[in-house]
Image (cartoon, helix red, strand yellow):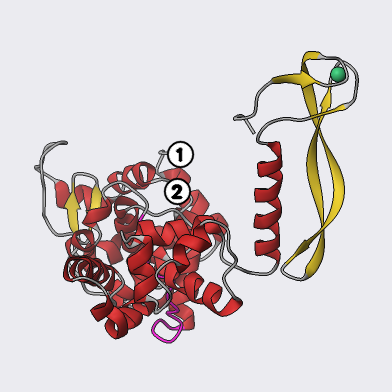
Amino acid sequence: MNKLMEKVLCAECRSIHPYDIHTEQVTREWNGNTYSFNKRIAICRNCGQRVTVPGLDDLNETEFEIKCRTVNDYIQIEEIRNILEKYDIDKRPLSKVLGLGEHTIENYLKGQLPNKRYSDMLKRILVSSAYLMKMYEKNHDKLNKHTAEKLGNKLEYYKNINSHNSTIESVALYILNSKYEITNMSLQKLLYYVEAFAQVLLNVQIFNNRCEAWMYGPVYPKIYEKYKSFGNSQITVDTIDLSEILSDDIRKLIDFVLNQFAIYNAVTLKDFSHSEAPWINAHVGYGEKEHCTEAITHEAIEEYFSEMHKKYNLSTVKGVKNYISSLGVV
Ligand SMILES: [Zn+2]
């Protein structure tokens, strides 16, 4: 809205005036069906007559299109742009890799509505690099060598960040598939709490990976390396169903940990861990800004959190909240 002019020429007043935006319900056709829509209209503040505001019609069109696509579960134009960005690919090569005519994606971006089947295919590609990989394997010879290689590398990159050959990788992907915004730094702390809570609440050692007492708290180096390319940004991965891989109990436990801890940002989680014995003891002898790779052992995690469980009852939301406030960070 802020792109629109603040004052326009009113035909009635024959002079320039500010206007107000009202809405008017209209019915419109979209893809063979009729929909009602709140169209924005501009009213001259001086005389109350309708005025023309450049750009307002386009805005109405865009809003109507977005609404209809949402209601009918069609891909949005913005999402098609996100596909190009995610896979770092141009419109034509993407069309080719999908086995479509070479101008198809370009036309979709201009507003042409894909049929439902292609729309569903595009939606799936946006959330699943594995699915695009299948089409790439089938159609990559339709691309020139350079483009094929570039996309191939990108897909390999996604294949790696979405791989889950061990429990810790599956847990990480489950966390990254949650509704929370997770960075590499917060992921490390959440894995640490999952390990701790699995031990004290389910009495299982969920994974046996090396955890180290880095400057910014506990880190699982293998997972840290895997998602390093995201820097401090939110990590995005494929939408992956892990219900066959992680048991109900484990998924419930992770959800519980996320509900209590993923609401805090990475720096706060780091501060929590800096108030906890497992990190403090492993980090002894290192300065605040000194790189430390000493191990935080599973036994240290188990011992400390078992004690905290006895004191606060970490199986309840209230218990965890009391525990967190005892750390004196928030
Ligand atoms: Zn007027």
Q: Quadrant of ligand 1?
A: top right
Q: Residue 297 location in percent, x, y?
A: 19, 64
Q: Residue 49 location in percent, x, y?
A: 89, 26
Q: Nearer the viewer, residue 24 or 142?
A: 142
Q: Residue at x 41, y 62 (%)?
A: 83
Q: Residue 20 location in percent, x, y?
A: 80, 26
Number of labels in the image equals 2
Question: Can you see residue 162?
Answer: yes
Q: Quadrant of residue 88?
A: bottom left
- Find the distance from the CA under tag 2 to the CA under tag 1: 8 Å
Mark carried by residue 219: none
Q: Is residue 300 above or below residue 48?
A: below
Q: Quadrant of residue 48?
A: top right
Q: Is the C-beta separation of discs 2 and 1 under 8 Å?
A: yes
Q: Residue 2 location in percent, x, y?
A: 61, 29
**In the image, farthest residue toward the top:** 15
Q: Quadrant of residue 286?
A: top left
Q: Is label 2 in a helix, a strand or a loop?
A: helix
Q: Nearer the viewer, residue 212 or 185?
A: 185
Residue with the mark numbered 1: 330
Q: Say if the magenta span includes residue 271.
A: no
Q: Amino acid at mark 2?
A: Ile
Q: Nearer the viewer, residue 76 or 98?
A: 98
Please rate how many residues cluster around mark 2, counting C-alpha atoms within 10 Å: few if below 14, some from 14 to 19, many from 20. Answer: some
What's drawn in magenta, residue-wise? 235-247
Residue with the mark numbered 2: 324
The reply, left or right, for residue 103 in relation to residue 276 is right
Q: Residue at x 25, y 68 (%)?
A: 151
